[in-house]
């Protein structure tokens, strides 16, 4: 009898714990978007301040880019939301810049030159997440579902001032992307 009572109590506790921890909860928001720095220019900071330790950051970024280029995940243009091909993904990180330089000899005239720079994995210093959030009102736990992720590279003015972060493309983890605005 004691064994049956013990098993019944254990079963009730397990059910209670599962119902509190296991359920997603009610929808808090269909979309929330935020940037996560994965690398900081401060070399003296501990790895956790940079959010991902060097080798883990490199593996992560390499996996992201390979998934995008291989077609394992659907990739979309940031502005138009049109699906991108593998060639488009390769071109997304390529930057062409017009530079005005001065000749090192007399008459020291200025000349324009075009520089094409391909994306380096180390250029990706942040990622942007698009998520769906749920809140379990019983225990206050928030559950997140990643909808898409976007690698970001630093963008600079001609004078070398940082202007912000340039999104490369969205990688979708859901079948229906982009989401419709209600």
Image: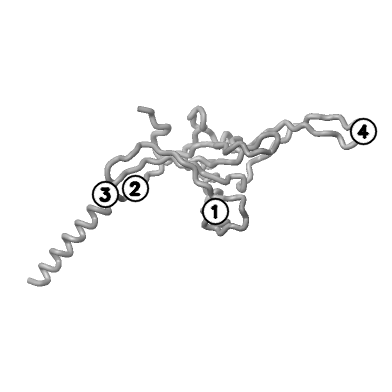
Compare marks 2 and 4 and give the one earlier in the sequence.
4
Going from N to C along the chain, the mark reached first, 3 or 2, is: 3
Q: Secondary structure at mark 4?
A: loop
**Lower sequence index among marks 1 and 3:** 3
Q: Which residue is mark 2?
A: 143
Q: Quadrant of residue 156?
A: top right
Disc 4 to disc 3, C-alpha distance: 75 Å
Alpha carbon of mark 2 to alpha carbon of mark 4: how far? 66 Å
Q: Secondary structure at mark 1?
A: loop
> If the image is split into quadrants, where does the C terminus sit?
top left
- Spatial distance from mark 3 to mark 2, Cα to Cα? 9 Å
Q: Earlier in the sequence, mark 4 or mark 3?
A: 3
Residue 10 versus residue 64: which sits nearer the camera?
10
Reply above or below: 6 against 43: below
Q: Is residue 112 left or right of residue 45?
A: right
Q: Nearer the viewer, residue 44 or 167?
A: 44
Query: In this figure, which residue is indicated by the disc labeled 1?
Result: 50
Circle number at residue 106: 4
Q: Earlier in the sequence, mark 2 or mark 1?
A: 1
Horizontal side of 113 relative to 138 (left or right) equals right
Quadrant in the picture for residue 114: top right
- Disc 2 secondary structure class: strand
What residue sits right under mark 3 in the picture? Answer: 23
User: What SS does tag 3 mark?
Assistant: loop
- Please state the horizontal and vertical placement of residue 57, each as a whole percent of the image: 55, 53
Mark 2 vs mark 1, CA separation in Å:
24 Å
In the rendered image, residue 178, in percent from the top left (x then y), is placed at: 42, 32
Which residue appears at 27% of the width and 47% of the height?
A: 136
């Amino acid at each position: 009898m004691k064994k049956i009572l013990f098993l019944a109590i254990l079963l009730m506790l397990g059910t209670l714990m599962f119902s509190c921890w296991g359920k997603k909860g009610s929808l808090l928001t269909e979309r929330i978007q935020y940037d996560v720095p994965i690398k900081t220019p401060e070399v003296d900071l501990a790895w956790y301040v940079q959010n991902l330790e060097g080798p883990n950051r490199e593996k992560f970024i390499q996996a992201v880019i390979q998934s995008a280029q291989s077609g394992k995940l659907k990739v979309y243009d940031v502005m138009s939301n049109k699906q991108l091909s593998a060639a488009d993904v390769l071109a997304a990180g390529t930057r062409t810049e017009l530079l005005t330089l001065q000749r090192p000899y007399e008459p020291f005239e200025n000349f324009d030159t075009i520089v094409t720079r391909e994306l380096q994995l180390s250029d990706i210093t942040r990622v942007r997440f698009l998520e769906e959030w749920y809140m379990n009102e019983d225990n206050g736990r928030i559950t997140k579902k990643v909808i898409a992720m976007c690698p970001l590279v630093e963008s600079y003015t001609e004078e070398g001032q940082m202007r912000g972060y340039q999104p490369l493309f969205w990688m979708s983890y859901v079948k229906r992307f982009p989401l419709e605005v209600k």
